[in-house]
Amino acid sequence: MMLLWLGLSVGCASPVERGEAALSRDDLLSAEREFRLALDDEPDDPEALYGLGWTFHQAGEEGPARDAFMRLIKVHPDLPQGYRGLGSIFASEGNLPAARAQLELALKAAPDDPAANQTLALVELGEGKPAEALARLDRLVGLHPERSELGQTRAVALLRLERPEEALAAAAVAVQGAASPRSLTAARITWVDAALQSCDDRVDPDNCAATAPPVRAWLDAADHVLDEAEASGALREVTSDMRRQVRRRRAFVEDTCPPGGGQ
């Protein structure tokens, strides 16, 4: 009976719901198919237009993504999604003024929109305004504790403000709450970055017995998290660079406080 109920539940899901579920799994081909099915039935469906645009955006196909978001703005100018999507495209292209303009339009339509606020926080980080980004994210994390990407971006802001231990805690929460493979990998990378910064200047050659073991533990944990990130097959270039950073810090620790040195 339970299997029958599950089958009926899946069968009753709308194309938009199936598309959003596919996006959460980073299954972009299935997501595109489902959103197109929804648009076949209702060409102006805002969630389907946004979902299709976001699917293209995640695939790096910015032309079709831009077209979907522009159509969404044309038929639903009062909704935030189209402006939010264009803002994300501009941000990914490095056009921060254009990104800000679109995101402010999104927030005019929906001031507490979590995705628009998160992307605007990323723009503020790109503009060299980490304090502004952190203030925005502190408010949003309280309103939307289920959105792990807000916590991950908040951890980045804390790192920019040279508060690595707070960033480490924020990134750990984001790892636990990540809802998709993509967000999980991003949170893991941020955690490792915070862990590495937490290790800096912690080893005292005159007190190796007390200061070296905690740093070695952080580096072991960073290697473990990178193993998990690499197993997902995502962001290999980033994880490889961070692996090199772990090795450099480990070499420094071993040179400063050799194992068995006794200090």
Image (cartoon, grey):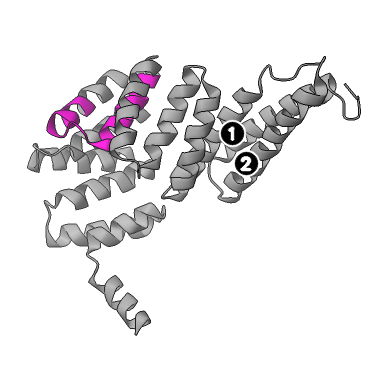
The x and y percentages for residue 88 are 30, 33
Residue 32 to residue 238: above or below? below
Image-based side of 31 in relation to 251, left or right: left
Looking at the magenta stretch, what is its main secondary structure? helix
Residue 64 to residue 216: above or below? below
Residue at position x 27%, y 41% from top? 65
The x and y percentages for residue 95 are 32, 22
**Residue 123 covered by magenta stretch:** yes
**Residue 6 covered by magenta stretch:** no
Residue that badge 2 annotates = 226
Q: Which stretch did the figure color magenta?
A: 103-125
Categorize mark 1 by other alpha carbons within 10 Å: few (<14), some (14-19), many (20+).
Answer: many
Residue at position x 30%, y 26% from top? 120
The x and y percentages for residue 238 are 57, 34
The quarter of the picture where the N terminus appears is: bottom left
Number of numbered discs = 2
Secondary structure found at label 1: helix
Residue 91 to residue 16: above or below? above
- The amino acid type, in three-letter code, at marker 1 is Val
Question: Looking at the rendering, which quadrant does residue 218 occupy?
Answer: top right
Question: Looking at the rendering, which quadrant does residue 60 occupy?
Answer: top left
- The amino acid type, in three-letter code, at marker 2 is Leu
The front one of 242 and 212 is 212
Q: Residue 33 carries which label?
A: none
Residue 174 to residue 154: above or below? below
Disc 2 + disc 1, Cβ < 8 Å? yes
Question: Looking at the rendering, which quadrant does residue 67 occupy?
Answer: top left
Return the disc, 2 or 1, that comes first in the chain's sequence. Answer: 1
Residue at position x 64%, y 36% from top? 240
Residue that badge 1 annotates = 192
